[in-house]
């Protein structure tokens, strides 16, 4: 079926509009990040779509809150302790307390901790590990994408895997990505680096994603499914 996808800014909302052969307008708020989408007939003007979105503003905000709250309720964080096994980029590691070392270190298949504040120290070393791997991937993908961020922040995020502040050239990544196979980190990073070119999710954005990471749609579906268990 022929369809045309575009992006429309309506006040504070970035709306992905899909026009195709249909009679009515359908408005949706999608997980995992509360994206606003509209399916509309070809003849529906941007002004008419914007009017519909504005009319449903309160409903959209409520749905976005619901999506965020649902994601927060799904969080099942690890409580790190000596002997706990957990995944790092798809490989299993085990926390081991070693009083002989001075600072936490990841040395496969262990995460070695001095033993003072185990949970806090494991989280800190995992963030550092994720951040280091991200910059390695940026070196690999930067020449392909054509732009690189000035700064990367790794933090706990309850409703999305990543975000991009295009004006500041800053990418934010969910610290939970360290627990998933690395292909999902690559997908999220490429997605956010592409936003350094394009601010929203319009035709140009998807065209760049197709050219850079052809399997991105498959990875997105799989990641959305994992999000129900990890986020």
Image (spheres, rainbow, N blue to C red):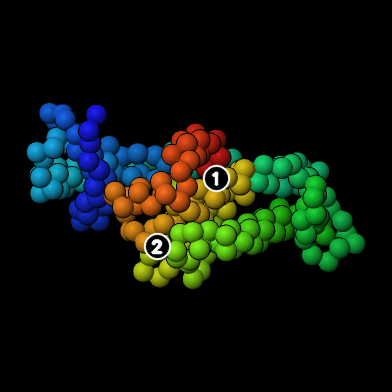
Q: Is residue 162 above or below residue 132?
A: above
Q: Residues within 10 Å of mark 1 (few under 14, many from 20)?
A: many
Check disc 1 and report the residue beneath it.
Answer: 184
| Residue 40 visible in this rendered orientation of the protein | yes
At which x and y percent is residue 18? Answer: 23, 39
Left or right: residue 99 compared with residue 227: right
Point 42% across, 41% down: residue:
32
Is any atom of residue 71 visible in this view? no
Q: Earlier in the sequence, mark 1 or mark 2?
A: 1
Q: Where is residue 29 drawn, in percent x and y?
A: 31, 39
Q: Secondary structure at mark 2?
A: loop
Q: Secondary structure at mark 1?
A: helix
Q: Residues within 10 Å of mark 2 (few under 14, many from 20)?
A: many
Answer left or right for 86 relative to 193: right
Q: Residue furthest right?
A: 100
Q: Position of residue 103 (x, y in %)?
A: 79, 65
Q: From the top left corner, tell me how far across and down residue 47 is, in percent.
A: 10, 49
Instruction: Tell me what residue is drawn at x 34 percent, y 58 percent.
Output: 198
Q: Residue at x 55, y 45 (%)?
A: 184
Residue 199: give its label: none
Which of the two residues, 116 or 78, is positioned nearer the viewer here? Answer: 78
Q: CA distance from mark 1 to mark 2?
A: 19 Å
- For residue 196, the mark is 2
The quadrant of the rendering that contains the N terminus is: top left
Identify whether 41 is placed above or below 82: above
């Amino acid at each position: 079926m022929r369809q045309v996808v575009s992006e429309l800014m309506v006040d504070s909302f970035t709306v992905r509009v899909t026009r195709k052969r249909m009679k009515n307008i359908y408005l949706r708020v999608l997980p995992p990040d509360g994206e606003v989408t509209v399916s509309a007939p070809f003849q529906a003007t941007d002004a008419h779509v914007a009017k519909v979105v504005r009319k449903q503003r309160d409903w959209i905000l409520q749905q976005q809150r619901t999506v965020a709250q649902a994601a927060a309720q799904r969080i099942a964080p690890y409580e790190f302790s000596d002997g706990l096994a957990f995944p790092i980029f798809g490989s299993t590691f085990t926390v081991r307390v070693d009083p002989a070392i001075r600072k936490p270190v990841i040395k496969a298949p262990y995460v070695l901790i001095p033993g003072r504040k185990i949970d806090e120290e494991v989280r800190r070393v995992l963030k550092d590990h994720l951040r280091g791997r991200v910059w390695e991937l940026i070196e690999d993908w930067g020449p392909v994408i054509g732009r690189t961020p000035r700064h990367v922040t790794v933090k706990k995020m309850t409703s999305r895997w990543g975000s991009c502040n295009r004006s500041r050239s800053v990418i934010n990544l969910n610290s939970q990505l360290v627990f998933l196979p690395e292909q999902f980190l690559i997908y999220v990073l490429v997605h956010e680096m592409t936003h350094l070119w394009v601010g929203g999710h319009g035709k140009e954005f998807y065209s760049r994603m197709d050219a850079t990471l052809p399997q991105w749609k498959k990875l997105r579906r799989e990641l959305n499914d994992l999000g129900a268990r990890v986020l």
